[in-house]
């Protein structure tokens, strides 16, 4: 592959641009006007564990201004996916290879139905933007690479080879199963956003662990009921660990939870709330609740977090304490 186009300038795309940049690879980034101007002036800067990578990609604001790439990396919010796919198909064709780095589960089936060569990079590391042109990543992976059934093997191999040399990349066995397994962790994003965890790391930690463990264990139960298989992904908790977090006494689970969360950064949903943007609540938590309804699995904690988060965003209130969230969950669940 000689030319990669990154559609979107979010934290993950900026990180990948910085890491993949090399002399024999042309990189183009499509960004909105303001971000495009900033990237054009500063380049792309990504910091990871004290090491800084800088790239100078070509910047465009429209696909019509870009040469045909060998691969398009789609790094937008899940709710913008329909618009992006329409744009790509209006300029290219179904054979255009695309690599999605989106959260959620809908994009797997959707992109597989729209493109012959659909690939998926399930991102299992934290990254956040500090400027429209700069990002901080907590690590260079892991990233789990999967693909649609129709994908060309040569393109699949070339895409994976492109990633694995610069990122901690591994191949998964099933795109849907991998996306569902990552979804379990993403279910807690709304909770961590409401309590402002990135700014209040030690507040009511026992109550926070209580809620998070139940949110994620409900996720496991729903996946099992729908025939989803566990995928062992480095950096993500195993289902056995999630069971332990739910049922072991807190004098054991809270210190483990505290240590695990110490390495986390502000999540993407919290970044959206801070910027006053639309969140991915419906694409993550809303779709999970639909899956739970389909399998008739009770998910009282997830249902309450979903409702409380919507009310909290609408109220424009400041961060809630985990103790307050727990009280509201019990109030909602008792109705």
Image (tube, grey):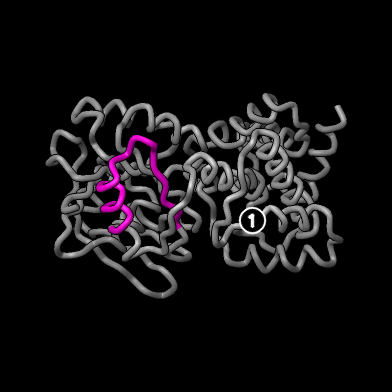
Give the mark count. 1
- Which segment did they paint magenta? 143-161
Percent position of residue 274, x then y: 51, 46
Q: Quadrant of the C terminus?
A: top right
Q: Is residue 1 left or right of residue 251?
A: left
Does the magenta segment cover residue 70? no
Does the magenta segment cover residue 158? yes
Q: Residue at 57% of width from left, 35% of height from top? A: 281
Q: Is residue 328 left or right of residue 26?
A: right
Q: Is residue 41 left or right of residue 277?
A: left
Would you say residue 81 is visible in this rendering? yes
Q: Residue at 27% of width from left, 43% of height from top? A: 72
- In depth, the one of 106 and 37 nearer the eye is 106
Percent position of residue 108, x then y: 44, 36
Q: Residue at 80% of width from left, 50% of height from top? A: 323
Dot 1 falls on a residue whose secondary structure is loop
Q: Residue at 59% of width from left, 30% of height from top? A: 287
Query: Which residue reaches farthest bottom?
Result: 50
Q: Is residue 166 left or right of residue 92?
A: right
Placement of 19 over or under 330, stated as above or below: below
- In depth, the one of 223 and 24 nearer the eye is 223
* Residue that mark 1 sits on: 197
Percent position of residue 2, x then y: 16, 53
Placement of 14 over or under 324, stated as above or below: below
Crowd rating for badge 1 (residues with CA inside 10 Å; few <14, some 14–19, many 20+): many
Percent position of residue 198, x then y: 59, 58
- In depth, the one of 146 and 311 nearer the eye is 146
Would you say residue 318 is visible in this rendering? no
The image quadrant of residue 95 is top left
- In depth, the one of 113 and 205 nearer the eye is 113
């Amino acid at each position: 592959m000689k030319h990669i186009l990154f559609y979107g300038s979010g934290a993950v795309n900026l990180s990948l641009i910085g890491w993949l940049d090399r002399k024999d690879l042309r990189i183009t980034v499509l960004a909105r006007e303001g971000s495009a101007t900033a990237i054009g002036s500063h380049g792309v800067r990504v910091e990871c564990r004290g090491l800084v990578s800088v790239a100078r990609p070509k910047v465009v604001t429209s696909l019509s201004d870009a040469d045909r790439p060998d691969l398009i990396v789609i790094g937008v919010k899940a709710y913008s996916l329909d618009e992006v796919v329409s744009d790509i198909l209006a300029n290219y064709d179904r054979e255009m290879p695309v690599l999605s780095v989106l959260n959620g589960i809908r994009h797997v089936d959707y992109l597989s139905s729209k493109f012959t060569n659909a690939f998926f990079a399930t991102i299992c590391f934290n990254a956040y933007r500090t400027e429209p042109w700069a990002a901080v990543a907590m690590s260079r992976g892991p990233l789990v690479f999967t693909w649609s059934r129709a994908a060309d093997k040569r393109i699949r191999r070339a895409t994976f080879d492109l990633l694995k040399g610069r990122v901690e990349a591994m191949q998964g066995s099933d795109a849907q199963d991998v996306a569902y397994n990552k979804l379990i962790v993403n279910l807690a994003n709304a909770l961590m956003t409401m309590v402002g965890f990135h700014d209040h790391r030690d507040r009511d930690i026992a109550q926070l662990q209580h809620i998070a463990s139940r949110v994620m264990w409900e996720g496991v139960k729903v996946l099992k009921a729908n025939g989803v298989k566990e995928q062992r992904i480095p950096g993500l908790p195993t289902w056995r660990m999630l069971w332990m977090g739910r049922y072991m006494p807190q004098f054991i689970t809270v210190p483990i939870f505290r240590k695990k969360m110490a390495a986390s950064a502000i999540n993407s949903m919290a970044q959206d709330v801070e910027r006053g943007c639309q969140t991915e609540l419906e694409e993550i938590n809303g779709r999970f609740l639909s899956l739970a309804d389909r399998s008739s699995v009770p998910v009282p904690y997830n249902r309450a977090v979903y409702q409380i988060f919507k009310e909290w965003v609408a109220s424009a209130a400041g961060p809630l304490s985990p103790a307050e969230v727990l009280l509201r969950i019990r109030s909602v669940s008792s109705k």
